[in-house]
């Protein structure tokens, strides 16, 4: 049976586990807030579910839980954050304000996050930029899970990307999607809970279509959404999050990873733009009219609307944590080296 926790209880569960397993206060707080943002918004595949992977990477020594990121200007409007082998959340915090300031000053700015281990949803970093009235795009690669169009061997990561646009009233518009037909974390949760997947999500080890999530995880591959279209987006993400910023492509990340189950080393690319520079003084009113016209169509909702609805409820309702996961996290805390 799942265990119902308040957000504060779940936050303490995550923070204590990270501190016990090698994170300093700054890294533990940053990772915990990222984990809790996912839980608060109803995205368990990127919440507490990820903690065992974080701990595995700490215990193996692959990730430095005490890393202090360094921010540098690579060129006017181009920032580079060296995470120094740490998890992404603290490095993202370090780069956020410099990126916002550069985008406001110049109208456009880019950030490359390098030597980092990213394990979270992307909407979290995009929302913080949108809150500053910037539009933003973020993307990251992972380890091979998906073939290029026409292939059956994994080469691209699931390679998510997120895009956000500020709203005048109400929550921002932010979408976060994998280039694959489904996020890998969702496939893992389906396997854990014994659920079948929709057709088109992946192939088994023999290269045959399957709806069995475990068959996809056991030597199979995930498929891009929309065939060659999703595969092309995955290729673009590889080039932006690896080629452009000098980080590892998915196949390189896999070749150099220690296979401990935690996030591999990789990079993230973030682009921030000030819509007031090109859109003029009425950019927001113009965009709001677009959203209003779109939402007047029956059955239409903005991406992220369900997430914001869940966010409003969880402070009162709390969250459900599978009992096995809850026990595992407590065991990782109590049995920390």
Image: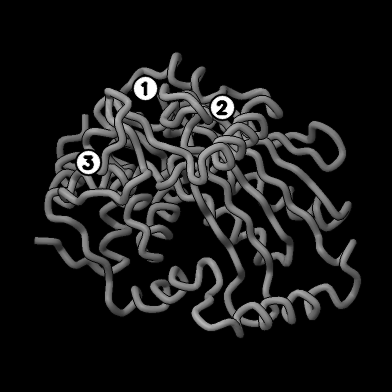
How many residues crowd mark 2 within 10 Å: few (<14), some (14–19), many (20+)?
A: many
Q: Is residue 267 left or right of residue 5?
A: right
Q: Secondary structure at mark 1?
A: loop
The quadrant in which the N terminus is found is: bottom left
Please tell me which residue is depicted at 38% across the width and 50% down the height of the picture.
Answer: 46
Q: Is residue 228 left or right of residue 320?
A: right
The answer, for residue 87, to whether it is visible in the render is: no
Disc 1 versus disc 2: distance between alpha carbons? 14 Å
Task: Please determine whether, in this image, residue 133 is positioned above or below residue 145.
Answer: below
Quarter of the image for residue 164 reads: bottom right
Mark with earlier residue (1, 2): 1
Task: Please determine whether, in this image, residue 104 is positioned above or below residue 114.
Answer: below
The circle drawn on residue 115 is 2
From the viewer's side, name the closer residue of 123 and 87.
123
Viewer-nearest of labels 1 and 3? 3
Q: Which residue is mark 1?
A: 61
The quadrant in which the C terminus is found is: top left
From the viewer's side, name the closer residue of 205 and 138.
205
Q: Secondary structure at mark 2?
A: strand
Disc 3 versus disc 2: distance between alpha carbons? 34 Å
How far across and down, in percent of the image, does residue 229 sit?
59, 41
Q: Which residue is mark 3?
A: 212
How many residues crowd mark 1 within 10 Å: few (<14), some (14–19), many (20+)?
A: some
From the viewer's side, name the closer residue of 27 and 139.
139
How far across and down, in percent of the image, does residue 41 sit?
40, 65
Quarter of the image for residue 312 reads: bottom left
Quarter of the image for residue 129 reads: bottom right
């Amino acid at each position: 049976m799942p265990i119902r926790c308040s957000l504060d209880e779940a936050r303490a569960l995550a923070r204590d586990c990270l501190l016990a397993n090698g994170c300093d206060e700054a890294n533990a707080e940053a990772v915990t807030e990222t984990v809790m943002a996912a839980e608060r918004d109803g995205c368990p595949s990127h919440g507490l579910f990820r903690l065992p992977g974080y701990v595995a990477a700490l215990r193996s020594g692959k990730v430095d839980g005490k890393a202090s990121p360094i921010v540098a200007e690579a060129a006017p409007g181009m920032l580079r954050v060296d995470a120094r082998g740490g998890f992404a959340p603290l490095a993202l915090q370090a780069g956020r304000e410099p990126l916002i300031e550069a985008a406001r000053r110049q109208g456009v700015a880019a950030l490359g996050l390098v030597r980092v281990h990213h394990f979270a949803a992307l909407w979290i970093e995009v929302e913080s930029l949108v809150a500053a009235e910037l539009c933003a795009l973020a993307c990251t690669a992972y380890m091979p899970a998906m073939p290029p169009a026409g292939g059956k061997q994994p080469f691209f990561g699931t390679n998510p990307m997120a895009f956000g646009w500020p709203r005048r009233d109400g929550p921002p518009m932010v979408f976060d999607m994998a280039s694959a037909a489904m996020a890998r974390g969702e496939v893992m949760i389906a396997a854990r809970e014994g659920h079948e997947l929709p057709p088109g999500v992946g192939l088994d080890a023999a290269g045959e279509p399957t709806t069995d999530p475990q068959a996809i995880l056991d030597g199979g591959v995930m498929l891009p959404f929309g065939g060659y279209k999703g595969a092309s987006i995955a290729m673009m993400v590889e080039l932006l999050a690896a080629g452009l910023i000098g980080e590892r492509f998915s196949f390189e990340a896999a070749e150099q990873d220690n296979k401990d189950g935690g996030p591999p080393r990789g990079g993230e690319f973030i682009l921030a733009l000030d819509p007031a520079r090109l859109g003029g003084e009425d950019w927001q009113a113009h965009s709001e009219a677009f959203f209003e016209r779109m939402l007047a169509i029956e059955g239409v909702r903005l991406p992220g609307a369900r997430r914001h609805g869940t966010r409003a409820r969880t402070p009162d309702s709390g969250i459900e944590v599978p009992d096995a996961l809850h026990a595992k996290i407590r065991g990782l805390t109590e049995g920390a080296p």
